[in-house]
Image (cartoon, helix red, strand yellow):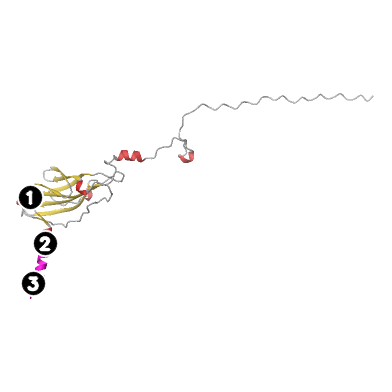
Amino acid sequence: MSHPISTALIALLAATALTACDRTPSKAGSATVSTAAKSERVPQEVGGIEGATPMAERVAVVGLLNKRNGLVRELEMKPGTSMRVGRAIVRMRACEMTAPWEDPPETGAFVQLTVQDQRDDKWRRVFSGWIFRERPDRNVIEHPIYDVFVKSCAMTYPGGEPVERSALKSAAAPKASSAPQSPATNGGEGTATPAGPAPAAPAAPAPVAPPKVAPPSPPANTE
């Protein structure tokens, strides 16, 4: 009989440990936060570009909207941190933006929204996933009061500060050659070049006198 009891005890302890992993203590001694949505695993480096700002050093600005009063709170957060506003807790797990040379530009953040239910004061996670600034239609956060959105993700790529896309595109555009181009290589129109002095016309040939023809001799006298 001891063997089944030991097995059941081990299973109970394992279930308790898994349940504890899905609970996050809230501030000011409030009830623990029970997750209603399964957390997604977020890689440390989403972009995978060597030399980019490490995930722990990035800073994102996440907006929290209260749909009832229309107030928006801008939260400046680093990956792994959380902030509480009223009955809502926003946790930012990661943020990412495309490199300046990539199109289309995108800025995203992996956030988790946990809300305290007014009926029983329990904390429940209502959203966990990626949200994108340029594609708000994909930010499906089904909650009657709160909504979250990403505004920016401060990070750099190899080469220094991010480059403005307009300047980058103009720098990447091919420059016209200063040498004159043939119609075949320039769409039928050659490159305009400064006009120079017109070439001198070839000298006209000197007139040649016609050859002299001897006059006919008189007929011989046969008488």
Residue that mark 1 sits on: 27
Q: Is residue 96 visible?
A: yes
Say which of marks 3 and 1 sits in front: 3
Is there CB contact under 8 Å for labels 3 and 2? no
198 with respect to 21 (left or right): right
The picture places residue 44, in percent across and down from the top left corner, at: 22, 52
The three-letter code of the residue at mark 1 reads Lys
The three-letter code of the residue at mark 3 reads Ile
109 with respect to 25 (left or right): right
Q: Residues within 10 Å of mark 1 (few under 14, many from 20)?
A: few
The picture places residue 107, in percent across and down from the top left corner, at: 24, 46
Main SS category, magenta section? helix
Which of the two residues, 70 or 41, is positioned nearer the viewer here? 41
**Mark 2, secondary structure of its residue:** helix
Residue that mark 3 sits on: 5
Residues shaded magenta: 1-16
